[in-house]
């Protein structure tokens, strides 16, 4: 086996002549490497470089002919304190929960983009999302805000005209809420910076996602890091 400067020169010569060895097989797309994608034919992946990151990438995928095909991609923002495991996340920590979640419905201050097939709930003046652990409406949309849900522990949705112009509810802690784990996790439009635990994308990307999402395809969102996303757990 050749070594040292001679081998390096030969390698450079081979590259210059276009005779370098053929690369190995291309890596499988991320959904194909995941243990669970939710069972549908559409998937969103929200991937941060590491758990301390506040930025990353959202990609949407379609399963066609038995293969996952990337349909679109956009820059993403995550919680101001990065990501946290969904099963142990604590409310109020400004972390985005990792895991695989369904997307129960869409909503927005603005009308649904033309072509939206998802159930789309318009935000009204009395629309609130309750995050009060003592309320029977914990982690639920309410109209109006119930007496047992304190205003200081709820989001008045219409006041977030930029972020909630268009959004999708993420099914984190939604179907069987655990008090203190967190409420009001959405995929929404970018604000001024990192989120309080949601995932955000630019406004045009959010509109494209809503036009793409087909409830019949049972789309889910997988949130994690490059290695961790392959092993996210469905919650």
Image (tube, rainbow, N blue to C red):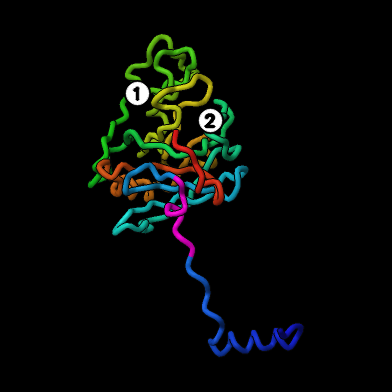
Mark 2 closeness class: few <14, some 14–19, many ≥20 residues within 10 Å: some
Mark 1 closeness class: few <14, some 14–19, many ≥20 residues within 10 Å: some
Q: In what element is the residue under mark 2? A: loop
The image position of residue 115, as x and y in percent, is 23, 47
Residue 163 visible from this viewpoint = no
**Which residues lie in the magenta part?**
27-35
In the displayed structure, 67 sits above or below 157; it is below
Residue for badge 1: 127
The image position of residue 14, as x and y in percent, is 60, 87
Q: Outermost residue toward the top?
A: 147
x 38%, y 51%: residue: 60
Q: Outermost residue toward the front?
A: 1
Of tags 2 and 1, the one toward the viewer is 2
In the displayed structure, 66 sits above or below 108; it is below
Residue for badge 2: 87
Residue 43 visible from this viewpoint = yes
How far, Cα to Cα, is label 2 from label 1?
Answer: 28 Å
x 38%, y 58%: residue: 70
Name the foreground residue: 82 vs 102: 102
- Residue 154, quarter of the rendered image: top left
* Chain-order first, disc 2 or disc 1: 2
Residues at circles 2 and 1 in contact by the CB criterion of under 8 Å = no
Q: Tell me: 144 left or right of 235.
A: left
């Amino acid at each position: 086996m050749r070594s040292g400067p001679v081998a390096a020169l030969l390698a450079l010569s081979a590259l210059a002549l276009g005779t370098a060895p053929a690369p190995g097989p291309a890596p499988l797309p991320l959904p194909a490497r995941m243990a669970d994608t939710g069972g549908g034919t559409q998937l969103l992946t929200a991937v941060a470089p590491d758990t301390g990151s506040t930025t990353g990438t959202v990609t949407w995928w379609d399963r066609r002919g038995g293969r996952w095909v990337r349909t679109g991609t956009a820059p993403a923002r995550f919680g101001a304190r990065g990501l946290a495991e969904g099963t142990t996340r604590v409310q109020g920590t400004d972390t985005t929960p990792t895991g695989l979640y369904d997307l129960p419905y869409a909503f927005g201050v603005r009308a649904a983009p033309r072509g939206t097939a998802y159930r789309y709930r318009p935000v009204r003046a009395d629309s609130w999302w309750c995050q009060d652990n003592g309320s029977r409406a914990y982690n639920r949309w309410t109209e109006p805000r119930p007496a047992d849900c304190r205003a200081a522990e709820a989001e008045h949705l219409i006041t977030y005209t930029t972020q909630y112009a268009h959004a999708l509810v993420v099914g984190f802690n939604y179907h069987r809420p655990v008090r203190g784990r967190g409420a009001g996790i959405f995929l929404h439009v970018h604000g001024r910076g990192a989120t309080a635990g949601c995932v955000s994308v630019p406004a045009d990307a959010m509109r494209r996602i809503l036009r793409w999402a087909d409830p019949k395809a049972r789309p889910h969102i997988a949130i994690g890091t490059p290695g961790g996303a392959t092993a996210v757990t469905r919650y």
